[in-house]
Amino acid sequence: MPRFLTLVFLAALLLPTTLWAEETTKLTLPESPDIRIIVDISGSMKETDPNNLRQPAVRLLARVLPEGSTAGVWTFGQYVNMLVPHGEVNEGWRETAINRSGKINSVALRTNLGKAIETASDDYVTGGTLENTHFILLTDGKVDISDSDDVNRAEEKRIVSKVLEPLVARGATFHTVALSDQADAGFLKTLADKSKGSFRTADTAEALNLAFLGALNTAAPQEQIPIEGNAFTVDAGVKEFTALIFRGSAKTGEAAESAGLEMIGPDGKALAQSSAPDNVRWAREAAYDLVTITEPQSGEWRVKGALGEGSQVTVVSDLRMVVSQIPPTFTPESPINVRVGFFEKADRITSPEFLDVLSVKLSLMSEDGSSGSKTLSVDSSPEEGEYSDTISKLPAEGVYRIDIVADGKTFARKFTATTEFILPVGMIEPAIGAPIDISLAEQSGQALPPEPEPEIQPEPQSEPEPQPQPEPKTQPAPVKPADPAPAVEAEPVDEPSVESALPFPLWMIGAGAGALVVLALILILLMRNRRASPDAADAAGEDPESLEDLQQEMADIEAEVPVVMAEEEPAEEDIPTATAVVEPEEEIPELVEPVNEDDDEEFGLDEFELSEFDDLPSEHEPENEPDDKPKK
């Protein structure tokens, strides 16, 4: 009964924790993010950003930040200035940010990054909480607060330990963007890695816009609809859409102004910036057009003009596709668990009638253009309306773009994110095969495969059968990786295995010997007392000769006790070889488990359409390749 009550008590303690863990893992609508934009205006920007690309990049962020989020903009050099006050993102905030972006320049003397982070994260801005707070940091140089390199290095250490760590502990995430190769990429990447953020390098206007947009998509993912060619379909549930059309480096400046991009609605009418109606907001920059249409017509819309990389269409709708957070980096040991769910306003959609008509597809594209895709949706609707998959391993290290597209016949939704696949230091690709390198086995702490086990001789004093023996311990021979037997002999940690080979444990032998010693001592003391008082012996009627015989027997027992100890405790040089109790050979496959290239969890590559992964080994090529597969 007490045992039963204990189990009930433990179950009562663990049940709330289990329920809480399950509740926190459920896919929910994301909260409104808090975005802090920190921009470098040091004098070195005159060389690294002569065309002041920072101004249109900040205006881009101001225009595409989701409604209802909070944001602020700070500039820094030697001192820190609040360019745009922190507040809720609405039309008034956007207008302020766009107007004040013209004050971004390159006149400051120093690069006081630590002070900028401290100012932008001050408690007075948001009352102390930094949950779901993302810092987007743009700089072109290194920490520069003094002419002394030692002072600047000390300041970098202070930023990481005294400034960054407390902010990360409160929930802050840093997305760093280096505007040139002169930037301290290692330091900026440290800020991103320690806060589980992203790091990007941008040396052109197009790259800077994409870097800002990528950071924003990570911090505040927005609902998108896919673009097919130059067209996209707006469903009846869309209240507003924003089309961000990049021109790319081919058309910038005056050429871009004269390009005259147009939007063709479902009714066939063309919309242009010069003739936009009241429900259309049209902004044009040197690198992009941003068109927002409220209460748009449902149907197919087309873009008349070239679409550059990064073009996207975001929507405001009650029907939302929610994707779990995609980390900026992942490894085979720390994979990406992708989960996709759908919500109508704030309610999760679990109706089979809705889910059964969905086609959910996940695709990956590397920086060199190689790509692959797989379908997440199955024949039956998923449990709790959630599609899932795991990305654990990719063919090569590098940065990959993840696209998730859901097609519901009458509507479509899209999610985009960027992540980097990293192999841990020491991991070998492809997987290790036989023969296994013994040096690797020793480093992993696993037992080595033994030679054929010799029989342990029952008596240490007898000569063992002739067999190969290692050098004596006083002169150990060098252990070679190809010879497993000497390696086991040389490891002192294998000595306890001798105890397991004896008939009785050493502690039992020692306890028995100790008991004999105590018994002998008691008998000796009794005999000495009798010897000291012979009259007492006579009074008791004992025969003196019998006493002498008993004394002789006690002396014999006393002389025999040390002999028992010497025979029962094996000497160090008599310890037999420990190869007879080495761990079974079947435990060795644990060494290659992390790098098993046949692992079925390798992003489900067996189900992937790998015809477009042109850098994969030939054994992964699919048997059938559709002829109508679109080219990336």
Image (cartoon, rainbow, N blue to C red):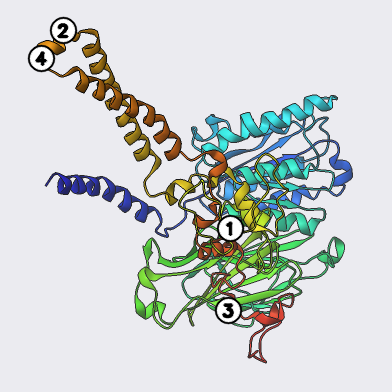
Q: According to the image, label 4 marks what residue?
A: 540
Position above or below: 629 against 21? below
Residue furthest front in the image: 545
In the image, what residue type sits under mark 4?
Ala
In the image, what residue type sits under mark 3?
Asp
Occupied quadrant, residue 516: top left
Q: According to the image, label 3 marks what residue?
A: 606
| Residue ID at (24%, 17%) | 527
Q: CA distance from mark 3 to mark 4?
A: 97 Å
Occupied quadrant, residue 349: bottom left
Q: Position of residue 486 (x, y in %)?
A: 65, 53
User: Mark 1 vs mark 3: which is more N-terminal?
Assistant: 1
Q: Is residue 94 visible?
A: yes
Q: CA distance from mark 2 to mark 4?
A: 9 Å
| Residue ID at (76%, 69%) | 368
Q: CA distance from mark 2 to mark 1?
A: 71 Å
Q: According to the image, label 2 marks what residue?
A: 535
Quarter in which the C terminus is drawn: bottom right
Disc 3 vs disc 4: Cβ atoms closer than 8 Å?
no
Q: Position of residue 249 (x, y in %)?
A: 83, 64
